[in-house]
Image (tube, rainbow, N blue to C red):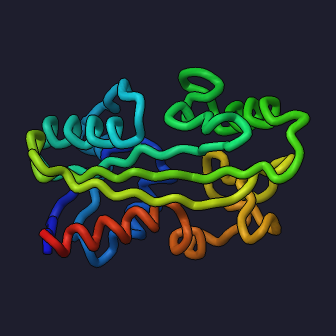
Amino acid sequence: MLHFPRLVIATANRGKIAEFSTLLQGIVDEVIPQGELGVMSAPETESTFVGNAILKARHASRVTGLPALADDSGLEVDALGGAPGVWSARYAGEGATDEENNAKLLAALEGVHAPRRARYRAVLALVTSPDDPRPLIAQGAWEGEIARCPAGEGGFGYDPLFLVDGGSRTAAQLAATEKNLRSHRALALSQLVDLMRGR
């Protein structure tokens, strides 16, 4: 099984860093956010989650000389043809806040009646070096629906609008420990660990 004393996490998103730090306990000795090593975020120029995840992982590894893990994830809403998708973090424009993205999503779904099916999708890419010819790719999806108004104080991103449990709670109403067991990133990470064991 692959083991990493130090692994760079290629994101500046504090919510993702917290999730990965928890989810990788016992697998990686030290999880290091790329910002602590002076790595600037790579522009997400690819059109797919897989492409962006690999791009970000290679960039972080190239700058630091360390193995790197990146994710590209987002929300796919069926009634919007899969949008916002890879544009989830900047749905309302570059530098948009979570609140602005959520507001735009609700506006886009105005008049759309239940079920407002959606899923969070995560793709993880792990590289042992910048030119790793066989990056490990893992994916996970978390099915749910979009609420008509935000609820909950936890999580980040679209969590206050993402209904789980048959529509009774949003992801923002889940305890962090529960979310980390069920989320798209948790599912992808479980798949990644299986792939690491195969190496």
Res. 72 image quadrant? top left
Q: Which residue: 27% across, 41% down?
A: 54
Q: Is residue 109 above or below residue 129?
A: above
Q: Which residue: 32% across, 29% down?
A: 42
User: In x, y percent, where is residue 133?
Assistant: 9, 45
Res. 194 image quadrant? bottom left
Instruction: Tell me the quadrant of the picture where the N terminus can be found.
Output: bottom left
Q: Which residue: 10% across, 46% down?
A: 132
User: In x, y percent, where is residue 24?
Assistant: 33, 69
> Does residue 94 appear to the left or right of 175 in the view shown?
left
Q: Nearer the viewer, residue 16 or 107?
A: 107
Q: Which residue: 77% across, 33% down?
A: 103
Question: Seen from this angle, which residue lies furthest top?
Answer: 93
Q: Is residue 120 above or below residue 43?
A: below
User: In x, y percent, where is residue 151?
Assistant: 81, 55
Tally of numbered tags: 0
User: In x, y percent, where is residue 85?
Assistant: 55, 37
Instruction: Tell me the quadrant of the picture where the C terminus can be found.
Output: bottom left
> Does residue 173 appear to the left or right of 82 in the view shown?
right
Q: Nearer the viewer, residue 47 or 182?
A: 47
> Does residue 177 appear to the left or right of 60 in the view shown?
right
> Does residue 48 appear to the left or right of 146 in the view shown?
left
Res. 62 image quadrant? top left
